[in-house]
Image (tube, grey):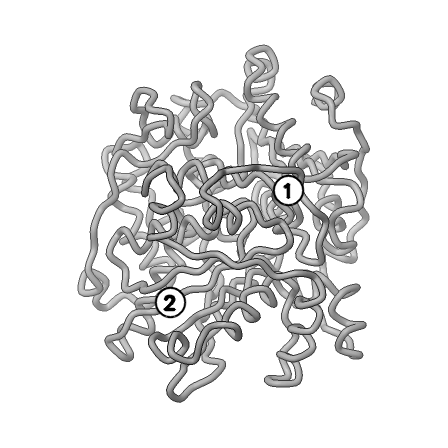
Amino acid sequence: MKFLSTREGPPVRLEQAIMSGTAPDGGLYVPASLPHFSPADFAGLDEFPHIATKLLQPFFDGTSLENELAAICRDALNFPVPLRPLESGAAPLSVLEMFHGPTAAFKDVGARFLAATMARIIAHGEFATPPVTILVATSGDTGGAVAAAFHRRAGLRVVVLFPEGRVSPRQQHQLTCWGDNVLSLAVRGEFDDCQRLVKAAFADPVLNARHNLCSANSINVGRLLPQAAYYACASLAYWQQTGKPTSFIVPTGNLGNGFACVWARRMGLPIDRIVFATNANTTIPDFLSSGTWSPRPSVATLASAMDVGDPSNMERLRALVGADADAVAREITAYTVDDATIRSTIRDEFQRHNVAWCPHTATGLHVYRTLSEEARRSSHWAVVATAHAAKFDTIVEPLLGTAVEPPPELAELLGWESSYETIDAQLADLAAQL
């Protein structure tokens, strides 16, 4: 399958789209077309790697990797993504637990898939000459997942940019504990400054050529494709049990997680409504209500991984469904949740189910609680739990008055030493570090 820029550049092969990150015209790569499936196409498949292989095979057909996709999925997607029932009865509610990977966040899915794919592309020698530099801006979880996925992979190095003082202490540790082929940079600014630096580096032909730059943010189509697979996995699991579709509430910042859900529904998976939960960075809800797309500086919140004022993947969504707000509103709805509500939701949900949720998951649970009774009864709802609460211990534990034990993988990383450099939000400073 060929891939096109959202700004209508020439078609390229999947390998080129992945290794380029962004298109030369500044657009984002998307498939030339989306395949269509029915639930029956997945009969007999119930494991995440097998479902992902089936879903993604059309995108890999005709590429140098078409016979390696099953191995990529098997190697990268080797942890569970369980759809956990939370409430039954007339208004069934589940939680899609996306925090069972190595860094306890949903970003592990895309990062591990991308690393396994890139390593094979480099090994083939046609589309990239090592060493390749993976340049990634993170608002919290992406950088840790990318660093873990690419750590010590031959021919690849990673440069992680994160906003100084704007991530949780445990998130920062995950961003800075790797060493070897991973360089961590704290940027004096906000996530949007980090993202701007990455885009500026890609737009600089000298830097790009000198360092073989490539992206691992959700601007890279190789990150997004596998994310659609966990929506397939979850919706099929419920469909096979009940014959009914699932509606998803997706906490979203840069819009990659939410857009992947839209892709999955467009490909015929049994998905009903899609609702985005945002924090005090209200660019998406404001667009839907005002009709004007107005990116702005991000605001620091408790749900720091969603602190994005200029979501990159809105360009993909508008290219897919139509540029105006009415077209987007026919596809999704979006709600904003402030910090006070995040705090109260973490407390309330712990009292309700004795489960600690991270601030991002809390935004989704709050949005579910604010739905009308009719809406809750009209569908099976699943809230996407994007990260383990232990990653946000300084926020969650004081609210609950109890410790949240980190999963074993996270506990191991927290014992490693960390180091990083601090730079101003200037391309010259980044270039010097590169």
Q: Quadrant of the C terminus?
A: top right
Q: CA distance from mark 1 to mark 2?
A: 28 Å
Residue 138's disc is: 1
Q: How many marks?
A: 2
* Residue at the image position 36 percent from the left and 65 percent from the top: 47
Mark 2, residue position: 247
Quadrant housing residue 200: top right
Asked if residue 273 shows in the view, the reply is yes
Is 102 situated above or below 137? below
Q: Residue furthest bottom?
A: 89
Q: Residue furthest front?
A: 290
Q: Position of residue 297 (x, y in %)?
A: 67, 38
Circle 2: element type: strand
Q: Position of residue 178 (x, y in %)?
A: 71, 43
- Name the amino acid, label 1: Thr
Q: Position of residue 105 (x, y in %)?
A: 58, 57
Q: Position of residue 348 (x, y in %)?
A: 65, 80
In the figure, is residue 60 to the left or right of 95?
left
Circle 1: element type: loop
- Name the amino acid, label 2: Ser
